Image (cartoon, rainbow, N blue to C red):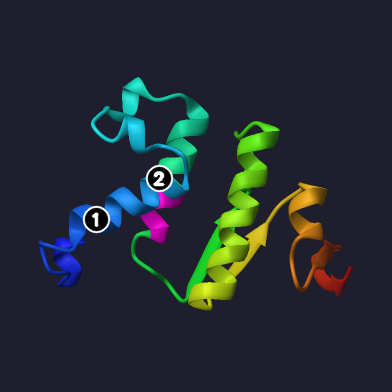
Amino acid sequence: LEVTGASPSTIPPRVSRVLTQVGLSSKATQLPRQLSGGEQQRVAIARALVMQPALLLADEPTGNLDEGTAATLHELLRDMHTEQRLTAVIATHNIRLSEACDRVLRLEGGQLHPA
């Protein structure tokens, strides 16, 4: 965040908020090797979200997450879409995640088609 010009005083609260949103506030001081695969995946998502992007590209964002955590992430992305106008382009095989999206396309034969 520092290299993007964020004020140093705003960084800790932003990081804390996003870690809480992805359910990792208790792991804030742990090293990557101390985290499970699913926790590492949530850190990757948090790193993207803390930048407050207008567009998020995500390839299987819930691939290593249990069903409950995946549902929480779906809700978070939906809330961010509503509150911060986040647009997420998600590649997934997760039917539940695709059902929560406003627009769904299928990739068939190398071409995109409406689902």
Q: Position of residue 14 (x, y in %)?
A: 28, 58
Query: As displayed, is residue 111 above or below residue 96?
Result: below
Left or right: residue 99 compared with residue 1: right
Q: Quadrant of the C terminus?
A: bottom right
Q: Position of residue 3 (x, y in %)?
A: 15, 65
Who is closer to the viewer here, 72 or 101? 72
Q: Amino acid at mark 2?
A: Thr
Q: Secondary structure at mark 2?
A: helix
Q: Quadrant of residue 105?
A: bottom right
Provide the major secondary structure of the magenta segment: helix
Residue at image x 40%, y 37%? 24
Q: Position of residue 22 (x, y in %)?
A: 47, 45
Name the mark on residue 20. Answer: 2
- Magenta highlight on residue 51: no
Residue, disc 1: 13
- Magenta highlight on residue 47: yes
Residue 87 is at least partly visible in this image? no
Magenta residues (range): 45-49
Left or right: residue 100 compared with residue 24: right
